[in-house]
Structure formats: structure tokens, C-alpha cells
Image (spheres, coloured by chain):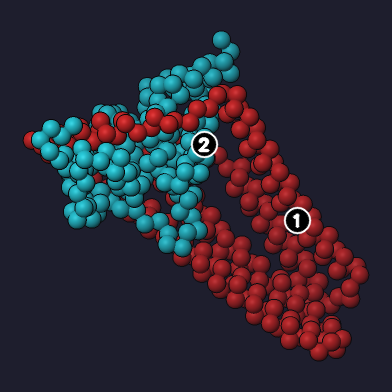
């Protein structure tokens, strides 16, 4: 009997919380929504500006520093890869997220887990694709300037190893680990729903 | 009444009627006070925005809880991203088993009991969290099913397990209890 009554006691206790509720007026919320839109626009502008800077940087290298086939290939591929990143990010942003009012919680939770998994999965290829162009450019640069100073060649080789380790191995492996974690949670959620005969 | 006006009116009504419940919900989803304040604002903002689309196909209460839970779930998933330990939620069964060691008396120190209850809920998987919160807010199984998308039978099973977990975690203490 006491066990049956206990949850009711807890419900009474529960209702005692939440007295310090934050209050927002529609005007405040409207301002907040506008602030968020402005923040988003700003981050889009920053992304595009970063891309423009990258193109300008490679442009300067192209016109003012001696080039060979490797540095040229590296520069062009870097710009293309960063362009692909940018398009991918903008397209992802444009995708319509499930509506929190129209979507039931199970489907919404699953969609959120999928979104997190896909973000990590996308980072795997984004990071992996960055390494080859940078490495090509490093090798080309080392070949051109190897005789200019003794440290240039070893530094460029060190940079290649570093880029390979970070962009092609450690970064993608870490993202894959997260992809797997979210996939496991999706599988667990599906399993729990199936086993309870949703 | 134009659209913006009715949206504002709906929001005011909901903030008045469900404000305390939404505050409890934010508390149950986020332990950090600063992040909780952000989450509360996010929930209120999502609700206000959602009334632009509210078409009355479900009850206002269902709509409010669904929006709030979904926004809070998003917050939880976002917060677990990039954390070294990763998302480690307990199922209701695990929460019940872990609870057997510590059993808090409700009537002795209500503040402690409430803190214990929040700590328990904050460790649950978002879906179980939604069911336990709706249960504590006195929603019936049909309403919980409508909010979550689970079957009514499934909700009943979960409520049964929730009661079991609560009984293991808490005791009344003294004859009078509450």
C-alpha cells in the first residue's frame, strides 16, 4: 500500500519545484529570434570570408612565389576541397529539421541522433580530404626552396607527417568513434521500441 | 486578431499556465544553472515560434509538452557531443538497480529528496526522462503516448517501471509521511 502511495507523495514533492520560473515576454522572444538570425547570417559571412581569404592567399602564392606542378596542384585542390566543405555546410544548414511541434518525441530523438551521427561522419571525409592537397603543396614547396635554407626541407617533411597524422588518421578516427557511438544509440533506441512492441 | 497577436496571446497563456512545469522540465534536463537558463529561453522561444503553426489538431497541452521535450532533447544531444566520456544514460532498469544502495526519505528533508529526484532524472535516457517527467506532471498514459509516439501499452510498461524505480529510491519516513 505504502509503495502505491509513494509515487503520489513524490508528485506532490515534484510540484514544489519550479516556483522560480523564468519569465519571457513575446517582445523579448522576438528580439532573441532576431538576434539568432543575425548570428547565423554573421557566421555565414565569416565562412564565406574565410573561403575568400583562402582563395586570395593561394592567389598571392600563385602570382608572387615561384611555383611547380606540385604546389599548383596543391593550391587548386585546397581551394576545391574548402569549396566543397563550404557547400556541404551551407546545404546542411538549408535542410529542414523536424518540426518540434509536429514530430513525436521518439522520431524527434532519433532524428537528432541521426543528425549528430551524420555531422561526425561528414567530418571524417572533410578532414581526410584536406591532407592530400596540403601535403602536395608542402612537397612542391620543399623542392623549390630546399637549397634556400637547410631547415626548409626537414620542416616541410615534418609538416607532411603532422598533416597526415592529424587530418588523415587521428581526426577521422576520432570522428568515426563518435559516429559509431551515435549509431549504437540509434540501434539501442530502435531495439527498445521494437522489443516493447511500439 | 492578426496572426502575430494570436501567437503572442497563445504564448502568454501557455507561459502563465505551464511556466512552472516548463521550469521543472528545464531543471530535469540541465543541471548547470547557466545552461539551464539558456535551455529555458530556448524552450520558450520554440514555443512562441511554434504557435505560428499550431493548428489545434492536438490539444494545447500535448503541443506544449511535445515542443518542450523535443527542444530539451536536442539540447541534451548537443551537450553530449564532443564530451570525452560520451553520452552515458541509464535505462530505467539500471536506475532501479543502482538505487538499491541509497534510499532517501521524502518527509525528512524535502530539499534533499527533490535534489535526489532531479539527479536521478538527469541521468536517464531522454525518452525515459520524458515519460517520467510527464508522469510526475500528472499526464495520463494516452497523453504521454501522444507526446512521445510510443504505444499506450508501452507507456504503461514504462510507468510501471518508473514506479518501481521511485519506490527503490525513496521511502516515506515516519507514519505521517506527507
Question: In the picture shown, does residue B9 fall above or below A91?
Answer: above
Residue drawn at (71%, 71%) of the image: A133
Question: In the picture shown, does residue B93 fall above or below A35?
Answer: below
- Location of residue A62 (image quadrant): bottom right
Residue drawn at (53%, 20%) of the image: B7
Q: Which chain is assigned cyan?
A: B
Q: Colour of chain A?
A: red
Label 2: how many residues lie within 10 Å, few (<14), some (14-19) or many (20+)? Answer: many
Chain under callout 1 = A
Going by the image, does B18 lie left or right of B46?
left
Going by the image, does A189 lie left or right of A44?
left
Residue A182 shows up from this direction: yes
Circle 1 — which element? helix
Of A43 and B13, nearer the camera is B13
Of B120 and B164, nearer the camera is B120
Residue drawn at (77%, 52%) of the image: A49
Q: Which label belongs to residue B99?
A: none
Quadrant where the C terminus of chain A lies? top left
Question: In the picture shown, does residue B148 fall above or below A110?
Answer: above
Of A14 and B91, nearer the camera is A14
Chain under callout 2 = B
Circle 2 — which element? helix
Depth check, mark 2 against mark 1: the one in front is 2
Quadrant where the N terminus of chain A lies? top left
Residue drawn at (46%, 24%) of the image: B15
> Mark 2 near mark 1, Cβ–Cβ under 8 Å?
no
Q: Which label belongs to residue B42?
A: 2
Q: What residue does disc 1 label?
A: A51
Mark 2 → mark 1, Cα distance in angstroms: 31 Å
Amino acid at each position: 500500500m505504502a509503495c502505491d502511495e509513494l509515487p503520489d507523495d513524490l508528485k506532490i514533492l515534484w510540484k514544489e519545484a519550479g516556483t522560480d520560473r523564468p519569465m519571457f515576454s513575446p517582445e523579448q522572444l522576438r528580439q532573441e529570434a532576431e538576434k539568432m538570425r543575425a548570428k547565423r547570417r554573421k557566421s555565414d559571412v565569416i565562412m564565406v570570408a574565410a573561403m575568400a581569404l583562402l582563395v586570395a592567399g593561394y592567389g598571392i602564392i600563385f602570382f608572387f612565389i615561384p611555383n611547380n606542378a606540385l604546389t599548383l596542384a596543391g593550391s587548386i585542390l585546397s581551394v576545391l576541397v574548402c569549396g566543397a566543405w563550404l557547400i556541404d555546410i551551407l546545404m546542411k544548414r538549408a535542410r529542414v529539421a523536424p518540426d518540434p511541434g509536429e514530430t513525436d518525441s521518439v522520431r524527434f530523438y532519433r532524428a537528432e541522433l541521426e543528425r549528430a551521427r551524420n555531422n561526425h561522419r561528414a567530418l571524417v571525409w572533410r578532414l581526410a580530404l584536406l591532407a592530400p592537397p596540403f601535403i602536395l603543396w608542402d612537397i612542391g614547396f620543399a623542392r623549390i626552396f630546399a637549397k634556400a635554407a637547410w631547415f626548409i626541407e626537414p620542416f616541410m617533411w615534418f609538416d607532411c607527417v603532422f598533416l597526415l597524422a592529424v587530418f588523415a588518421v587521428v581526426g577521422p578516427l576520432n570522428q568515426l568513434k563518435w559516429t559509431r557511438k551515435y549509431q549504437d544509440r540509434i540501434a539501442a533506441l530502435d531495439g527498445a521500441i521494437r522489443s516493447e512492441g511500439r | 486578431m492578426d496572426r502575430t497577436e494570436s501567437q503572442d496571446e497563445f504564448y502568454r497563456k501557455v507561459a502563465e499556465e505551464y511556466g512552472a512545469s516548463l521550469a521543472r522540465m528545464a531543471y530535469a534536463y540541465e543541471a548547470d544553472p547557466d545552461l539551464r537558463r539558456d535551455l529555458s529561453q530556448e524552450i520558450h522561444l520554440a514555443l512562441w515560434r511554434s504557435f505560428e503553426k499550431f493548428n489545434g489538431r492536438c490539444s494545447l497541452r500535448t503541443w506544449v509538452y511535445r515542443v518542450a521535450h523535443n527542444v530539451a532533447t536536442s539540447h541534451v544531444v548537443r551537450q553530449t557531443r564532443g564530451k570525452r566520456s560520451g553520452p552515458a544514460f541509464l535505462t530505467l532498469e539500471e536506475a532501479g538497480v543502482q538505487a538499491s544502495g541509497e534510499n532517501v526519505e521524502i518527509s525528512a528533508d524535502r530539499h534533499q529528496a527533490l535534489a535526489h529526484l532531479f539527479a536521478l532524472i538527469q541521468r536517464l535516457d531522454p525518452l525515459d526522462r520524458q515519460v517520467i517527467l510527464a508522469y510526475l506532471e500528472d499526464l495520463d498514459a494516452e497523453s504521454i503516448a501522444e507526446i512521445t509516439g510510443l504505444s499506450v501499452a508501452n507507456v504503461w510498461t514504462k510507468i510501471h517501471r518508473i514506479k518501481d524505480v521511485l519506490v527503490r529510491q525513496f521511502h516515506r519516513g515516519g507514519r505521517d509521511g506527507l
